[in-house]
Every structure is written in C-alpha cells, then in structure tokens.
Image: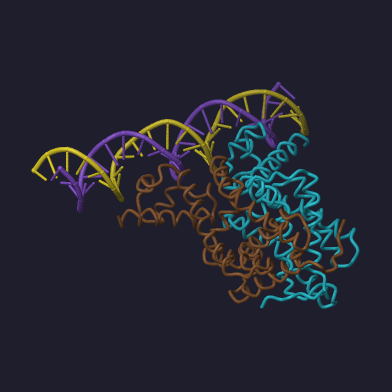
Chain colours: A brown, B cyan, C purple, D yellow
Amino acid sequence: MPQKSSTRARILDAATDLFGLRGVEAVSLDVIAAEVGVAKQTLLYWFPSKDDLVQAVLESAVVELSVGVEAAIRASTDHPLDRIDAVVRAVFRSAVRRPALLGLVREVSRLPAANGDRLADALTPLVGRAVRYLGAEMDAGRLRRADPRLVAALCYATVTGIATEPEALRAVGWRPTTAELRRLRSEMLAFLRAALTPDEPVRLVQ
Amino acid sequence: MPQKSSTRARILDAATDLFGLRGVEAVSLDVIAAEVGVAKQTLLYWFPSKDDLVQAVLESAVVELSVGVEAAIRASTDHPLDRIDAVVRAVFRSAVRRPALLGLVREVSRLPAANGDRLADALTPLVGRAVRYLGAEMDAGRLRRADPRLVAALCYATVTGIATEPEALRAVGWRPTTAELRRLRSEMLAFLRAALTPDEPVRLVQ
DNA sequence: CCATCTGTCTACCATATGGTAGAGAGGTTC
DNA sequence: GAACCTCTCTACCATATGGTAGACAGATGG
C-alpha cells in the first residue's frame, strides 16, 4: 500500500506545519487539502474529523521530538549538566529543522479539552520521569538544589525561548542569521549551565 | 459620555482576555459580544472591523504592560541585576493579574501581517532601548558579558516561561497553588540572577 | 417641538467551515 | 467476469463567521 501511506503522510506533514505555525483553530481543512493538492474529502477519508487529524498530528509530533531526545540522552555522558545540554540541543535541532514542532507544543494549552487531555496523558509520565531524574541528581549534589519541577520548567522555557524567540524577535525587527542563531544557542546553553551548576555563591532573592 | 466609554472599555476588556487566552483567530466576534452581553453590531459600532479590534487590544496591552514596567524601573536601584529583577517582577505581576496579556505577546508572531507590522513598529524602539542598556551595563562590568540581544531574549523567555508555564504544566498534570507559584517565581529569579551575574567561573560550552 | 446626534438593536447577506452522501476508477479475489 | 475493496473525487448541506442596512429609542439643542 504505497499510495495509501503516501497521501496520509503528506496530509499529516502539511497539517503539522500549518497547525504549528499558524495555530490549530486558524487553519481550515480546505487550506490543508489545497496545500497537499488533494480534495478535502480525501483528507476526511484518512482522518474522519478535524479532531482526529489534530490528535494524529500531536501524537506524531511527540514521537518525532521524543526520538531525538532519547537518542541524545543515550549518547550523552551521565553527568546531568551534559545530559540536559544534550537534550536541549536535540530539541533545538528539531526546532530548527521543523519550527512547527515547538509551535505545536506551545499550542497545547489552548487546545479543545479532548485533545489536550489525551496529550496530557501522553506527556505526564515523561515529565514525571524528568522531574524524578532532576531530583535525584540534586540529591547527589550534581545540580543546584531547587524544586526539580521548576528546573524542568526552566529548561522547557529555555528551549521554547531559544526555538521560538527568533520568530518573535523577527517581529521586532531583529532577523538573526543562521550563524547568529548558533551562537545564540551556545550562549543560552551557557546561561542554563551557569544557572544549574551547584556550589556557586548565588545571591538569593527572597 | 459615561455610557460610551463603558461599553467600549468592556468590549476591549473581554476581547483582551479572550484573544490572549484562546488566540485571535479562535475567537469570533459573536463570542466576544455574548461575553460582554451586547449585540455583535454594537461591537462593530465601536470597532468597525475585527482587525480594528485586534489592533486596539494590542495597543492597550502594550500600554498596560509598559506602565507597570516603567514604574518598576523608576522604583528600582540603578544596578542592572536589581533593575532586571524589578522588570521581571513587574511583568510577572501583570501576568498573574491578567494571564491574557502575555498570551497576546506570544500570539504576535502568528498575527496577520498588518497587525503584526504595526505592533512591531511600536515594540522595536522599546527593545532597542533595552538592548542598548544591557550592552552598556556589560561594558561597565556589572553584567556577564554576552550578546545583549540574547540577554533580552533570555529575560523574555524567563518571563513568558514563568507566566505561561503554569498553564502548560497544568496540561501535564501539575496544578501549582498560588504559594507554589510565588516560590517558583523566586527561584526562577534566582536562576536568572545567577545566569547574569559576572565574574563567576562559567564552564562555557563551545 | 422639531432636528440631529449617539448608541443599541433586529434583520439580513455572502462566504467559509466542518462534515455527509454517494459515484466512479482501478485493482484483487474467487 | 462478477463481486469486492481501496482510494479519490464531485455535489451538497447546516452552521458559523465577518460585515452591511437600516430602524428605533433617548438625549441634546435651537
């Protein structure tokens, strides 16, 4: 069934980019169908409703992101600073290759409840695992002591910041080149590392 | 003209919240009108088109955010770490009081060109000023040396991270209380401070 | 007391949207 | 070769959307 997979995959692909870049509610089935070069009803043949399409897009996006992250984790040393670094870099690579992916993540909080909930079911264990990992490394003294959930949120914010900032900055007139982006990423990682490294005198703001 | 202002203001208010939380394209004029308790045509009387309404919402949001930030800057010491701290706190206060505000900012990059461009015209000088300020403070050795545009982006990411993370984390099962949020904010500010403080040995990732 | 102006409304309209019904083309199986 | 299956299409449909036309109520002012 080569034809079958091909059309379905092309629809999923176009929908991922359009949903991620413009927002789920802003993109109509007609637009997606036109982009793929197919009748809307062909689209509805493969995905019986828009909700089904959204669901499929989210699931494939999670898989696409996870694959890169898992590989990066396996390839990294076991020091948490290196591991976090590797994960952030992996997500960054995904985001550069496919800006829509993190756009989708950012989109989650405004999804209709049904889709959002099912996605939450998929993500909760992943986040839980990360939080437990960070907590254990803090106990071992290899990360600055803090609420591990906060650190997870900080990493997430850094990553989405790195990945979606260019887009936002473009809106205020800064159009970074690829080289600038790479440097920006390195500096951002250095900041993250500085923020997470333990045993440095930090003036806490109470 | 008390009646006049009142209806217009109520429309602007409801539109700000709905656009910011659900996205501009996802919210119809009917929904806004119903929320305000007024006929759609009353809304179109005050804002001749949806684009006009969006524009007005963006402008008032920029003003609302700027007022708090400017006040925080005036009230802070002139040390950049304190000043950044004050600005971030001010934005955070705005975001807690009105979660839609940062949602709108996040929304900018996917706005139709006309609105996006006009907003960019309003924001570019503000961002430019911040970047020049950060650069000067780095030259004076009071901030870690880096690309000031990056630092601006980092602060922005931190703020939107702080402000929109709760929403995103709720989607993965963590429902932070107000107290947790406050602590989370403090820790995040400490991280930011640690990342920006100069003269600390930082292991740079090349 | 008439004219005007302001603000809100009811009644429409053209278009776009998500979705249904069903036909037909091409291959596979018995 | 007839029945079936897979895939794509054209033709619709009900609803929702942004927007227009114009009526009506009340204040204002000469």
Q: Quick one: A68 or B60, which is closer to the camera?
A: A68
On the image, the x and y values in percent for residue B152 come to 73, 66
Q: Is residue D4 above or below residue B192?
A: above
Quarter of the image where the N terminus of chain B is located: top right
In the displayed structure image, the side of residue B85 where residue A187 appears, left or right:
left
On the image, the x and y values in percent for residue A83 come to 64, 66
Quarter of the image where the C terminus of chain B is located: bottom right
Task: Tally the numbered discs.
Answer: 0
In the displayed structure image, the side of residue B4 where residue A24 appears, left or right:
left
Q: Is residue A88 above or below residue B35?
A: below
Residue appearing at x 61%, y 40% in the figure:
B44
Residue appearing at x 31%, y 57% in the figure:
A2
Residue appearing at x 51%, y 51% in the figure:
A58
Q: Quick one: B2 or A30, which is closer to the camera?
A: A30
On the image, the x and y values in percent for residue B96 come to 76, 47
On the image, the x and y values in percent for residue A63 come to 51, 56
Q: Quick one: C8 or B122, which is closer to the camera?
A: B122
Say which quarter of the image contains residue C20. Answer: top left
Q: Quick one: D25 or A159, which is closer to the camera?
A: A159
